[in-house]
């Protein structure tokens, strides 16, 4: 198996220390991405929750800048993969090559790991690749390892995929299948900046001047310690019942063909625990679940095709918000 020197576990940090590091991380990333504090916060929460992040938006609003800033803020290995139509699975995973000594083949083969073998992987414009290449990333996100030529190779820890994609309506894209969308902890959209923020971007150009100057805030061990701490955040029975009622509504809604899976329910619970940790709490509250539900759940539901042509991600988000308005919040 391919091994790495990255720590596989770390003792949990205290909520106070984790919140301090999360604030430093957010401030660092916001130097490069101006005017989007909530988007940056969600990205940090995804990292702490141990999930993967999908950013879907039009070109030019800062998707790649956010991914690069987050990667630069973690003192760990980083690789960027530019997805294109002709990208092959082997270009991502790696391949075995003949072992050579003094210019002669020994008959043995050595595995040459691909760019997926990094702590932070930026999968840029993932929906421009073929479905076969997209599926090569799926195993890595699902299992934490990859299989090449019958051999299993373990990926480093922490392992965090930040994928960007243009909206499915854009030419030359291949929509991600439901099975792969379900592997992303959150789907975020950055959106246009506010006028004042856009004026500051024009004056300072932070993606050019600030991004290259970012220094790491977290070590790999810090990241694992924050994840371990998030797992200990209290999530009581009343919150479990509240979360399950939201999930059940997605499975019974008249406009939804496929509702949220148990994996999605677990993702929402873990995200809520990460949010509480970022706030310096050792317990979750209903707002942790409610505030994250759209970003965690909307991309996991499949709209009923009988309702007409393919519907947008915005409609899925609207339906989740409607469900949140119907489900009573525990006191």
Image: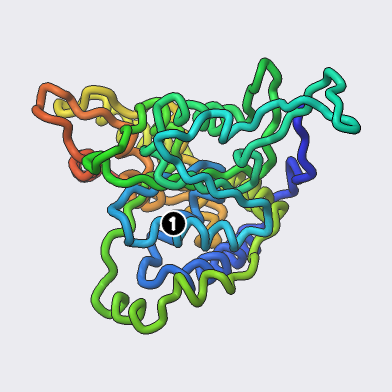
Crowding at label 1, few (<14), some or many (≥20) Cα neighbours within 10 Å? many
Percent of width and height locating residue 320: 24, 40
* Front one among 116 and 272: 116
Colour scheme:
rainbow
* Front one among 322 and 176: 176
* Front one among 141 and 258: 141
The residue at which mark 1 appears reads as 64
Residue 306 occupies which quadrant of the picture?
Answer: top left
Q: Is residue 76 visible?
A: yes
* Image position of 178 with respect to 124: above or below: above
Q: Residue furthest bottom?
A: 203
Residue in the picture at 50% in, 66% down = 29
Residue in the picture at 28% in, 80% down = 196
Give the tally of numbered discs. Answer: 1
Residue in the picture at 53% in, 43% down = 161
Percent of width and height locating residue 185: 45, 41
Q: Residue furthest front?
A: 103
Percent of width and height locating residue 287: 37, 52
* Front one among 137 and 255: 137
Residue 265 occupies which quadrant of the picture?
Answer: top left
Percent of width and height locating residue 33: 42, 68
């Amino acid at each position: 198996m391919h091994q790495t020197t990255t720590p596989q576990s770390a003792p949990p940090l205290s909520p106070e220390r984790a919140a301090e590091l999360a604030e430093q991380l957010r401030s660092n990333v916001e130097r490069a991405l101006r005017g989007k504090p909530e988007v940056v916060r969600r990205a940090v929460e995804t990292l702490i929750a141990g999930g993967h992040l999908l950013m879907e938006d039009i070109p030019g609003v800062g998707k790649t800048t956010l991914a690069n800033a987050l990667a630069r803020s973690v003192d760990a290995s980083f690789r960027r993969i530019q997805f294109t139509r002709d990208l092959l699975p082997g270009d991502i995973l790696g391949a075995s090559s003949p072992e050579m000594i003094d210019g002669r083949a020994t008959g043995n083969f050595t595995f040459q790991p691909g760019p997926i073998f990094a702590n932070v992987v930026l999968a840029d414009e993932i929906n421009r690749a073929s479905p076969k290449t997209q599926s090569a990333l799926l195993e890595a996100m699902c299992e934490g390892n990859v299989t090449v030529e019958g051999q299993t190779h373990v990926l480093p820890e922490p392992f965090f995929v930040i994928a960007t994609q243009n909206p499915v309506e854009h030419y030359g894209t291949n929509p991600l299948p439901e099975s792969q969308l379900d592997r992303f902890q959150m789907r975020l959209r950055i959106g246009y900046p506010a006028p004042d923020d856009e004026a500051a971007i024009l004056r300072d150009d932070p993606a050019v001047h600030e991004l290259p100057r970012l220094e790491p805030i977290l070590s790999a061990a810090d990241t694992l310690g924050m994840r371990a701490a998030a797992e200990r955040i209290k999530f009581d029975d009343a919150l479990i019942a509240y979360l399950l009622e939201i999930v059940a509504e997605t499975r019974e809604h008249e406009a939804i063909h496929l509702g949220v899976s148990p994996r999605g329910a677990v993702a929402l619970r873990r995200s809520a625990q990460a949010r509480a940790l970022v706030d310096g709490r050792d317990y979750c509250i209903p707002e942790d679940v409610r505030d994250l539900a759209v970003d965690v759940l909307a991309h996991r539901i499949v709209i009923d095709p009988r309702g007409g042509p393919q519907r947008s991600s915005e409609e899925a988000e609207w339906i989740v918000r409607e469900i949140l308005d119907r489900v009573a919040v525990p006191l």
